[in-house]
Image (cartoon, grey):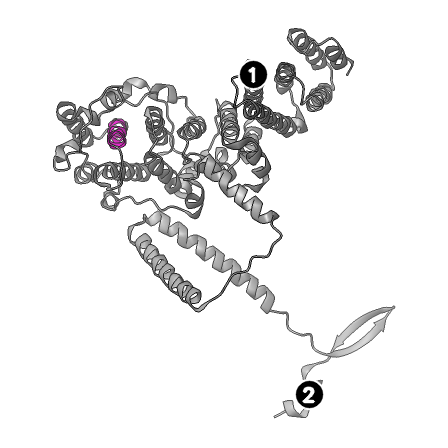
Amino acid sequence: MPEIRHLDNHNLWEPNEFAGSCFRIIMYSIQSERVQAQYSHHVIQQVLGHLDDHNRATPKVRAGMVQVLQEAVDIAAKGSIGPTVLEVFDTLLKHLRMSVELEHGVRSRHNSENSTTSKTKESEEKIVQNAIVQTIGFFGGNLPEYQRAEVMMFIMGKFPVCGAPCHTPHMVQIGDQGTRCIQIMLLRSLIMVTSGFKAKTIAAALPAPLLDPLFSTSLMEDNELRQLALEILHNIIDRHDNRAKLQGIRIIPDVAALKIKREKISKQDISFMKMHGQQLYRQIYLGCREEDNVHKNYELLFTTLALITIELANEEVVIDLIRLVIALQDLALFNDVNMSMFMRCGIMALVASYLNFLSQMIAIPSFCQHVSKVLETRNQDAQYLLPEHIFKEKCSLPSTLEKGNKSLYFLTSETAESLAGLGYSVDRLSVPYVPHESDEDSVSKRKSVADTISIQVALLSSSLSDKPQVAEITFESLKKAIDTSATEEQERRRQVIEKFQKAPFEEIAAHCESKTKSLHNRLQQIFELAVRPPPRPSGTVTIISGHAQCQSVPVYEMKFPDLCVY
């Protein structure tokens, strides 16, 4: 485009006021044409291609191009930009990664000297990164729901997670901090894309390709990454703009005064909770156990529980949520793991805040009375178990928690008695909640960025090695292998028995149903291979009009071998 060449020749990308005005004029003039969509695509593709050609330009020039692209996309999004949607996001994500590489490359070259030039370049690269994130979020926020869900999965597919070999060269090159920077930038982009996302069903907004990596991110060891993952989840779940009313973990005296908006739970959302509810509860439980949790983590966990209650909770889900928070209370009270007193009191405050909220939402007088009584006792004797006190900067913590004083804690028996006879399956409250970690959780949930890099480097080095690995087999090694396999088999059987004893009925039923479907599919394959159509009876072939036709012979006229005749 001659306009782009003019901007290059006269260095008008920095500052970009003139460039932005030019492209606004171009885009709005195209809007009046009947072939607006075609030319809008062409303009956006030209700017994207020019950004690719100048990927080594100064940060301010690249930032100016990105901002011009944002304005062009904003105007085009009011109509349609067609097949260039994923192309725009792919190009922006590529330049985001390149900017991080340049920033951390500058930092590594000047790590031994406090250079003003290097700091200036780093800050300029931050400008580029923020411009790209703003453009991604601004563009994604203007897309229709079906396209926005696809873009969310596309961005999450670029997230550098443990065991993703496609990211290995870049992760090794930019190091731990560069990898973490890319992760944060991508999550911030997703927050902007999901802002204001009002999907009709949660299942449509959270498909498996997005749900699984998002849950894995919510369990990484970096507390900031966990916070961003929870904020994305809130944007998706909160379809009635209730999150602003729930900000801050606290004891809400009058939930009705918040004027929370909600609708009847749809059948699709009920099915979603039956399928993914246990996975969601497990993420909350394991997220509360993270050692580096700070005040904001507990706030976001409280908001998560409250939004699930508003948007997805029927009688069955309410019972599951009560079992979950009672298990969290037991975790803080009886767990022998070396857990800090701040963590224990923080979990206790989270449980108190949520049960106070839940009791007022379901409005059962006896349940509200039990919760209020516990809160009143804590306010008098143990204020460190309440959110208004534990999250203050200077809050005196006890050396141990009083396990014998039952009036300080929420009791399952009291809760079951309150809910009995009101449509709630209180029998399930007697079954303690135990999270069952999946194979994916055991691999990825505890992996920090440093662990991810070390694993990927090991995989890369092993794949590049040409030397054959020779293993020495001895009697002792064979004996050790047999003993290990026997021990693993016993442990596996113990876990299966424990699962069927303690797991909720819904989880067991879903597990058995999946196995039944797998067995049915396998049997169907075997039958298709084994069962053949019966052989056609022998007969004579008659040629009619050049085509061969088989004339079958009646059975009584067939000649069988003597050995076949009795």
Q: Residues within 10 Å of mark 2 (few under 14, many from 20)?
A: few
On residue 560, the disc is 2
Q: Which residue is mark 1?
A: 127
Q: Is residue 147 above or below residue 452?
A: above
Of badges 1 and 2, the one in the foreground is 1
Using the numbered discs, state the Cα–Cα distance from disc 1 to disc 2 in whole angstroms.
Answer: 91 Å
Q: Residue furthest front?
A: 112
The amino acid on which the numbered mark 2 sits, given as a three-letter code, is Phe
Main SS of the magenta part reads helix
The image shows residue 336, relative to residue 307, as above or below, that is below
**Residue at 30% across / 23% down in the picture?**
249
- SS label for mark 2: loop
Please state the horizontal and vertical placement of residue 158, each as a whole percent of the image. 56, 34
Q: Could you tell me which secondary element the residue under label 1 belongs to?
A: helix
**135 lies left or right of 311:** right
Would residue 440 be counted in the magenta stretch?
no
Nearer to the camera, 130 or 539: 130
The region drawn magenta spans 341-358
Mark toward the start of the polypeptide (1 vs 2): 1
Is 393 placed left or right of 159 in the picture? left
Which numbered circle lies on residue 169? Answer: none
Q: Position of residue 213 (x, y in %)?
A: 48, 37
Q: Nearer the viewer, residue 154 or 270?
A: 154
